[in-house]
């Protein structure tokens, strides 16, 4: 997210990627004055680079280029040794690398891309390993809301970075985005080690009643340390494939918005970067709130036995895909109205967050025994999607400046909807036979 808000300030040709008709649909004089004023401010406080849309797309994707290689071995190791130290170390190293981004950028785009590839691998350690903690901490009836609350932190963090980042770009310069938030990441990693424990049994601060409640609620689920993996059965499992496909397709579109939302608002809507940061933060603020509410609603429907678990997972996934797809396809036709566009972007992020209580948490239902390994598979799917979609977006914008965004949104909606159809057909919510102890086969 730091790169997302910084890159419009780092380059001096972002406006070239906007549709040709955008400038004719709003007052040209004021918008041009805003752009010129913004560029002057940038030049006064930080260096700028001549990066084409293709290079920008590669930079925004580079965090994912090496990341898809790491989740499976990390998930395997986390399942055996626990996640506490893997998450803490991954967060610390990733944060330290963030501090070096301004220095490396001066050496050239190639060095920046390499640094981000390495940084992405360590961020995978954080995203993948933390799920092994939830396996031992989240009671089944509270699983959706607990994970949704935790995951909402990413949306809230994005909101804060965008709010502050736009202001930093136009005052002290874009390098301070990486200095400040890299420093915060280092501080958070130091807090992680003394405060987080892999399971309730070893936690010194919780009450005896809470510890007994969590342990008893999870007693019926198999979390054996036997890590012989039923690979053949996994490969043949359509419910598992449905989650992987859903993950890839939904994050295809979401990665584009994460990487390009400030650029889209800055270039297409002709908003200066400070205001662009504020406007870009709004969708993530509402997304974090709706993510929590979605988890609470899902667990309410389950605890009251209003809907079956599989119905809840598919319903929330469908809502998190269909409505956002319609909204993104409609964006090019409402680009003349800033208010309407922002309303669509807020609704897109808010409704998309419902998937956190749908297919995103579904691996905990079908195979809790192998959740860290399967979380690694999901991260592979996510990072492949993240490596491709922003790069493709940069190519589209470079080749067709007038209709680039329209084509991007149409392609993304088609991919998103296709993944949903596959999930609705093959998705399940029962523990699979290959994930039960008696069916384990050794590699």
Image: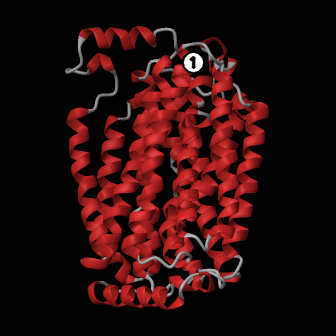
Q: Is residue 316 visible?
A: yes
Q: Residues within 10 Å of mark 1 (few under 14, many from 20)?
A: many
User: 402 or 222: which is nearer to us?
Assistant: 402
Instruction: Say which residue appears at 48% left-offset and 27% top-offset.
Output: 296
Give residue 130's position: percent from left, percent from top: 41, 37
Instruction: Say which residue appears at 27% left-offset and 20% top-offset.
Output: 202
Q: Is residue 100 visible?
A: no
Give residue 264's position: percent from left, percent from top: 54, 71
Q: Is residue 398 above or below residue 82?
A: below
Give residue 91's position: percent from left, percent from top: 33, 49
Q: How is the image coloured?
A: secondary structure
Q: Is residue 69 above or below residue 115?
A: above
Q: Is residue 195 above or below residue 138?
A: below
Give residue 70's position: percent from left, percent from top: 51, 49
User: 387 or 252: which is nearer to us?
Assistant: 252
**Residue 84: quadrant of the picture:** top left
Q: Is residue 334 left or right of residue 87?
A: right
Instruction: Say which residue appears at 58% left-offset and 55% top-offset.
Output: 254
Please state, as top left, top right, bottom left or bottom right, where the C terminus lies in the image: top right
Q: Which residue is mark 1?
A: 302
Q: Secondary structure at mark 1?
A: helix
Q: Is residue 23 left or right of residue 140?
A: right
Q: Is residue 318 above or below residue 297?
A: below
Instruction: Say which residue appears at 66% left-offset and 19% top-offset.
Output: 430
Question: Count the marks: how many?
Answer: 1
């Amino acid at each position: 997210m730091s790169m997302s808000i910084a890159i419009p300030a780092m380059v001096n040709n972002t406006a070239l990627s906007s549709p040709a008709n955008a400038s004719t649909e709003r007052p040209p004089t004021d918008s041009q004055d805003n752009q010129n004023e913004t560029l002057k401010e940038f030049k006064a406080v930080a260096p700028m680079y001549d990066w084409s849309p293709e290079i920008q797309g590669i930079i925004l994707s580079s965090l994912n280029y090496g990341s898809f290689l790491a989740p499976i071995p990390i998930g395997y190791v986390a399942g055996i040794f626990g996640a506490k130290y893997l998450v803490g170390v991954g967060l610390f190293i990733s944060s330290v690398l963030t501090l070096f981004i301004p220095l490396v950028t001066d050496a050239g785009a190639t060095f920046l891309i390499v640094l981000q590839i390495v940084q992405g691998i360590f961020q995978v350690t954080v995203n993948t390993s933390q799920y092994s903690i939830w396996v031992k901490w989240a009671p089944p009836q509270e699983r959706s809301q607990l994970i949704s609350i935790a995951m909402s932190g990413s949306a809230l963090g994005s909101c804060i970075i965008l709010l502050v980042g736009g202001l930093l770009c136009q005052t002290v310069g874009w390098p301070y985005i990486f200095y400040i938030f890299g420093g915060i990441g280092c501080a958070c990693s130091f807090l992680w080690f003394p405060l987080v424990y892999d399971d309730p049994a070893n936690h010194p601060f919780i009450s005896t009643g809470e510890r007994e409640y969590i342990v008893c609620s999870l007693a019926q689920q198999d979390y054996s340390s036997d890590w012989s993996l039923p690979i053949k059965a996994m490969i043949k499992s359509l419910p598992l494939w449905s989650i992987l496909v859903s993950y890839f397709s939904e994050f295809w579109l979401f990665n584009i918005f994460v990487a390009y939302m400030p650029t889209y608002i800055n270039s297409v809507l002709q908003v200066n970067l400070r205001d662009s940061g504020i406007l870009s933060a709004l969708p993530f603020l509402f997304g974090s709130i709706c993510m929590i509410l979605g988890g609470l609603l899902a667990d309410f429907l389950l605890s009251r036995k209003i809907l079956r678990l599989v119905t809840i997972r598919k319903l929330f996934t469908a809502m998190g895909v269909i409505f956002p797809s319609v909204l993104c396809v409609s964006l090019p036709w409402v680009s003349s109205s800033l208010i309407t566009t922002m309303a669509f972007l807020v609704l897109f992020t808010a409704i998309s967050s419902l998937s956190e209580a749908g297919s995103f948490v579904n691996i905990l239902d079908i195979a809790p025994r192998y959740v860290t390994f399967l979380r690694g598979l999901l991260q592979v799917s996510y990072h492949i999607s993240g490596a491709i979609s922003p790069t493709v977006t940069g190519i589209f914008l470079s080749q067709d400046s007038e209709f680039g965004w329209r084509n991007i949104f149409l392609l993304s909606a088609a991919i998103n909807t296709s993944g949903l159809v596959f999930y609705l057909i093959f998705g399940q919510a029962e523990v699979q036979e290959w994930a039960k102890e008696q069916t384990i086969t050794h590699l």
